[in-house]
Amino acid sequence: MRNVYAELAEALRTRRPVVLVTVIDGPGTGAKLLIMAEGERFGSLGDETLDERVGRDALGALAAGLTGVRHYGRHGEPAQTELTVFVESFTAPRRMIIFGAVDFAAALSQAATLLKYSVTVCDARPIFATRARFPQADEVVVDWPHRLLARIGPSLTTRDAVCVLTHDAKFDVPAIVAALGTEVGYLGVMGSRNTHRDRLERLRAEGVSPESLERLHAPVGLDIGALTPEETAISICAEIIAERAGLDIVRPLRQLSTPIHH
């Protein structure tokens, strides 16, 4: 048990995603199983088959950032109630990767930080991608977008967001193609409708499928009448929240009779 707590403390210190499973009712009450996002385990629920089956479900909960109670049979059989476990996910902060060191990126970085995102701003131009211009960002990277995604892409999840704010095909097309190769949950692309139509043609020429193009939120943001970079940042973050809630149509709460909280 000491190893479980020590490993949990180290994972929290280094901000590594980890999930802790505790038996709260049934055989082995109090037993704990700690699972790292990469699959490494510490402790046991008392049965190897149980560890395997519950561990698989726990990793799914971790990927979705979910915490809650689950029920199993003695050996991990689903839809049984011999055993009750508490699955507690300790996830890393959601990540937002912003491509393009422009004024909109500074405003979006600030808004995303308010929403507890870990923000990375990336641009290949060192004169623009500076810490002084983006003090709110957790990380400012001078590199080509597709090269950054080649390094970090495998770690992005459906909880994360990529926002492409450039208007230059040599930047945004490779960035979008690379982002579409990840599991990122939100992919927003800035630009006018004419710019986006031209961009779509370039992406098709790169072999991007129609199904993949459907993942793009472009033009980026909700239609709230935004004009300034700060207002645009709010519209982008509002779209991300609505997307996470599964809302296709967004209306004022005063026009609705449904529960306020989804």
Image: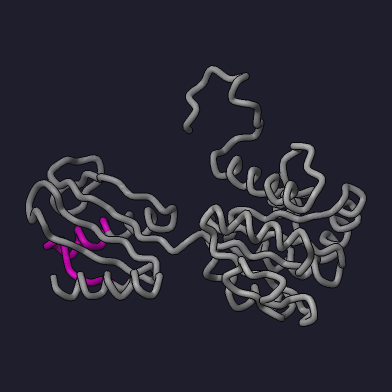
Does residue 207 belong to the magenta stretch? no
Q: Is residue 31 left or right of residue 97?
A: left
Q: Which quarter shows the N terminus?
A: bottom left
68 lies above or below 165: above
Query: Is 250 placed above or below 126 here?
Result: above
Which residue appears at 69% of the width and 68% of the height? 178
Which of the 4 image quarters holds residue 140? Answer: bottom right
Q: Which residues are magenta?
A: 41-54
Residue at the image point whose x is 80% and y is 81% from the top: 127
The image quarter in which residue 32 lies: bottom left
Identify which residue is drawn at 32% across, 59% down.
56
Colour scheme:
one colour
Tally of numbered tags = 0
* In-front residue for pair 145/85: 145
Q: Is residue 212 left or right of residue 80?
A: right
Q: Of residues 100 and 147, which is closer to you in this image?
A: 100
Asked if residue 166 is positioned above or below residue 87 in the image, the reply reads: below
Query: Who's the residue at 24% across and 40% down the image?
Result: 79
The x, y position of residue 196, in whole percent, is: 86, 53
Left-right relation of 11 to 167: left
Q: Position of residue 194 (x, y in %)?
A: 92, 50
In percent of width and height, residue 204 lies at 83, 59
